[in-house]
Amino acid sequence: MTDATATGSSVPAPARPAAAANPDRIDPKRLVAFFAMVFGMFMAILDIQIVSASLAEIQAGLSASADEISWVQTAYLIAEVIMIPLSGFLGRAFSTRYLFAASAAGFTLASALCATATSLEQMIVYRAIQGFIGGGMIPSVFAAAFTIFPPSKRNVISPLIGLVATLAPTIGPTVGGYLTELFSWHWLFLVNVIPGIIVSVATYSLIDFDKPEMSLLDRFDWWGLGFMAAFLGSLEYVLEEGPTKDWFQEPLILAFTVVMVSAGVAFFWRVLTAEEPIVDLYAFKDRNFAGGSAFSFVLGIGLYGLTYLYPVYLGRVRGYSALQIGETMFVTGLCMFFTAPIAGRLSGKLDPRLMLFMGLCGFAGGTWIASGITKDWDFSELLWPQILRGCSLMFCMVPINNLALGTLPPARLKNASGLYNLTRNLGGAVGLAIINTVLNDRMDLHLARLHEQVTWSSNKALETLAGLQGALSSLGSDAEMAALKKLALIVRREAQVMAFGDAFLLLTGLFLATAMLVMVLRKPAPPKPGAAPGGGH
């Protein structure tokens, strides 16, 4: 008689350690499905910025005006910002498998349609479809990461999704610049087609970690959807167009503001009283989720605001092409890539609040250096600000993900993930609106002050004018007028550069102030080896 039989046990003793270790094992099928989802999210986020460096080429190809072409970006952003919070409800109703596969397939088809657009109107419609459908992929990845992986694996998974979520918009102008320079602007969209088909097939075939709840559709809140679409769409439009149209002096901006406020009041009333609300705002009762979402909002300002500021400076002041801008900005992407594994390792050893504090201070250090910007700044002068930005993004993103989503119960993850991603996008929209307003207003202020200094009674101004006139003497009698125009352009350029310095200084204050609030968050409990993942079905 064996020992096992003697003790009355029918299970061999060695099976127990294997069973205990089983919760930490990651199913290879789910791992492949998750990586396919991550790549789909990368495409959706990349498309926010991939056209930003090539708008001039798209404008020429569609025979659009400079004012109209911005709608290629605005249409995508408005549609995406509506879908991101809605995806939580749709993910519960249809399951992650059907929502993600349909989103990937629809995004791929819309990308192909964008490449065939022959008019601005067609492009706006196709971009809106692309943004709306693609927005369903982004929150699904965050929810899946905290659903299928045990807490002990989050120091690997969180840096991965953080890297993708921040790297995609950062390298977007670079990728767009190369594709437009080497091929044509059509390839900004065609590049999505083959990968999109692969992602659609892979996710449909492999995702199996939740089930649809079709009964939710019987209680679908159409009024809530209408109010949310009007609120978020109007908000995005006001933030995008306000800085360039003098805000409320423009009747259309004022009209959309009225719609935004009215729909916002109705939306918040509806989600707090409906039987099955379109989004679950009660997730904000969790202090870490609310705090993490607030920090995600600030991170959105740093991510999208600085991705906008540096290229605008390089284009307007330095006169760089899209390709040159992309090459200069590539440093940030490299730093993020190499910092991601370091951030992942540290997230398992350091208090995440300390990591977040370090990241925000790094952001502040980079923008502080950049606040001393001059017209002569080039790759070497922008190197350290970009290095600090790239490293800081990962030091912020990883702990924010873990702090915001790591302590929520599984039932709230899908809705909460949509809200969490929405705060980052809204942070980017608010940041861009503030930055553009600062650039416009401070440039006007500096221009007025410089005009007070550059007068006919200023010896320095007269000496500069005489030097310019001498350099342009080959123009004969037109030399004096050409010198005056040249001097006016120099004054305008200096006012513009000073406005950039002010914008960087404002961001420095924002990041430092936010860093001081880090300790408001609770330190999450350390992950236990063998702990189950966030939940299954």
Image: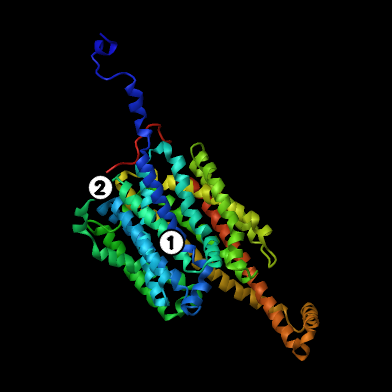
Q: How is the image coloured?
A: rainbow
Earlier in the chain: of badge 1 and badge 2, it is 2
Residue 211's tag is: 2
Residue 301 x, y percent position in the rendering: 50, 59
Locate residue 122: give its quadrant. bottom left
- Using residue 491 as the reference point, say whether residue 155 is left or right of it: left
**Of the residues shown, which amino acid type is indicated by label 1?**
Leu
89 and 228: which one is in front? 89
- Using residue 436 as the reference point, say whether residue 489 is left or right of it: right
Which residue is at 52% across, 58% downward?
A: 170
**Of the residues shown, which amino acid type is indicated by label 2?**
Lys
100 and 278: which one is in front? 100
- Using residue 127 as the reference point, say whether residue 371 is left or right of it: right
Which residue is at 44% across, 58% downward?
A: 45
What whole-number distance in Å separates the C-alpha atoms at marks 1 and 2?
30 Å
Which callout, 1 or 2, points to the residue nearer the camera? 2
Locate residue 219: give its quadrant. bottom left
Asked if the residue under mark 2 is in contact with the one under mark 1, i.e. CB atoms within 8 Å, the reply is no
Quick check: 282 above or below 59? above
Which quadrant would the N terminus be assigned to in this image? top left
Quick check: 402 above or below 25? below
